[in-house]
Amino acid sequence: MAKKIVENVLLNGGFGVNIMANELKFKLGLQLAKPKPYHLRMANETTIKLLGLIKNFKIAIDGTPYIFTFTIMNNLLDESYSMLLGKPWLKDAKISHE
């Protein structure tokens, strides 16, 4: 697979999952590992229908490789980003935030 750059990635330590917009999934030519509908419960107790998961997706961040599982959503909460890295990545990268 050719290298591709993804811009406008949001880091959010409040999210327990990594999220990718369905549009970005298509642009990257990815397939869902588990194409079942899932639901994500938000902090305000609302639920959002998810499309499925992409597992074992390799990404290099500042030259360091990581393996991700992404939850795929039709529409992200904020259209200004196409990917959100949450607690799983922060923990794996050993990043401390306050």
Image: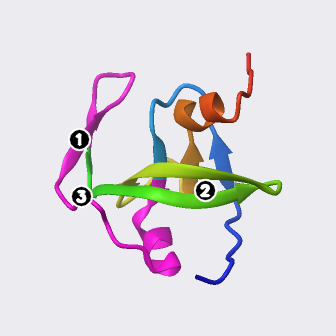
- The residue wearing badge 1 is 39
Of the 4 image quadrants, the one containing the N terminus is: bottom right
Q: Which residue is mark 2?
A: 81
Q: In 3D space, how far apart are the residues under numbered discs 2 and 3 (Cα atoms)?
A: 23 Å
User: Any magenta on residue 46?
Assistant: yes
Q: Earlier in the sequence, mark 3 or mark 1?
A: 3
- Measured in 3D between alpha carbons, the distance from the residue under mark 3 to the one under mark 1, in whole angstroms, is 13 Å
Q: Amino acid at mark 3?
A: Lys
What residue is rendered at 17% in x and 56% in y?
36
Give neighbour class at mark 3: few <14, some 14-19, many 20+ (Cα, 10 Å).
Answer: few
Q: Does 18 appear in magenta?
A: no
Name the amino acid type tagged 1: His
Mark 3 lies on a secondary structure that is loop
Extent of the magenta region: 20-48
- Viewed as shown, does residue 49 lie left or right of 95? left
Q: Disc 1 versus disc 2: distance between alpha carbons?
A: 20 Å
Depicted 93 relative to depicted 26: above or below: above
Q: Residue furthest top?
A: 98
Badge 2: how crowded within 10 Å, few (<14), some, or many (20+)? some
Determine which residue is flagged by label 3.
Answer: 34
The spot of residue 38 in percent (x, y) is 21, 46
Task: Kindly identify the residue that appears in the image at 46 percent across and 56 percent down.
Answer: 56
Please give the name of the residue rendered at 54% of the width and 25% of the height, measured from the top-left corner.
Answer: 14
Residue 38 lies, with reference to residue 8, above or below; the image says above
Looking at the image, residue 82 sits to the left or right of residue 51; the answer is right
- In the image: residue 44, left or right of residue 3: left
Image-quadrant location for residue 60:
bottom right
Q: Are marks 3 and 1 in contact (CB under 8 Å)?
A: no
Crowd class of label 1 (few under 14; some 14 to 19; many from 20; radius 10 Å): some
Which-is-in-front pick, marks 1 and 2? 1
Residue 22, placed above or below residue 80: below
Q: Which mark is residue 58?
A: none
